Amino acid sequence: MAEQQEQAAPDALLTRIGQVVMLHHGGDREEARSRFLNLWAEICEDGDPLHRCTLAHYLADTQEDPEDELAWDLRALSAAEERGAPLSVRGLFPSLHLNLAADYVKLGRDEAARSHLHRAREFAAALADDGYGDGVWAAIDRMELRLGEGA
């Protein structure tokens, strides 16, 4: 029974994160940021890497200051790279690096952006040929054009 509760808890937290994502996509950035920060306080810095990665990834999107957005995206990548992070997190690497590339573009740091774009491209090679993979490749193409690397 305790094992079932442990397995249900991660799903419950991801569901709660998803609910806040919908709030954010609905246009309420301030409330979403507040709720994400409450969830962050709940899971703490030493919580499950998947939860921290997911939450930091979405928290970055609610930031107004590009430096704050970068800080949260770096937290997301750091959690994904942690020892003990589930293998499912590897599928997020292209998106995480693309977000960092976009952050660095906003900050006028094109070389750092290019570095993360190249990492995104490397990790994207392992993505499935599906909607998520297609979306990531389209975002890579857009970022390449933005950085003047398009074919």
Image (cartoon, rainbow, N blue to C red):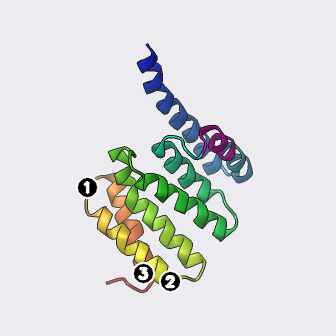
Residue at figure coordinates x 49%, y 41% from the top left: 48
Question: Which part of the image, by quadrant, shows the C terminus?
Answer: bottom left
Question: How many C-alpha atoms fall within 10 Å of the one at disc 2: few (<14), some, or many (≥20)?
Answer: some
Q: Position of residue 141 (x, y in %)?
A: 38, 73
The circle on residue 145 is 3
Residue at figure coordinates x 26%, y 63% from the top left: 125
Residue 92, quarter of the rendered image = bottom left
Residue numbers of the magenta segment: 36-44
Q: Mark 3: which secondary structure?
A: helix
Between the C-alphas of marks 1 and 3, the distance is 22 Å
Sequence-wise first label, 2 or 1: 2
Q: Position of residue 12 (x, y in %)?
A: 52, 30
The residue beneath circle 2 is 110
Between the C-alphas of marks 2 and 1, the distance is 29 Å
Question: Which part of the image, by quadrant, shows the N terminus?
Answer: top left
92 with respect to 65 (left or right): left
Q: How many numbered marks does the figure carry? A: 3
Sequence-wise first label, 2 or 3: 2
Residue at figure coordinates x 43%, y 26% from the top left: 7
Sequence-wise first label, 1 or 3: 1
**Which amino acid type is marked by label 3?**
Leu
Nearer to us of marks 2 and 1 is: 2
The residue beneath circle 1 is 129
**Which amino acid type is marked by label 1?**
Asp
Residue 8 against residue 66 in the figure, above or below? above
Question: How many C-alpha atoms fall within 10 Å of the one at disc 3: few (<14), some, or many (≥20)?
Answer: few
Question: How many C-alpha atoms fall within 10 Å of the one at disc 1: few (<14), some, or many (≥20)?
Answer: few
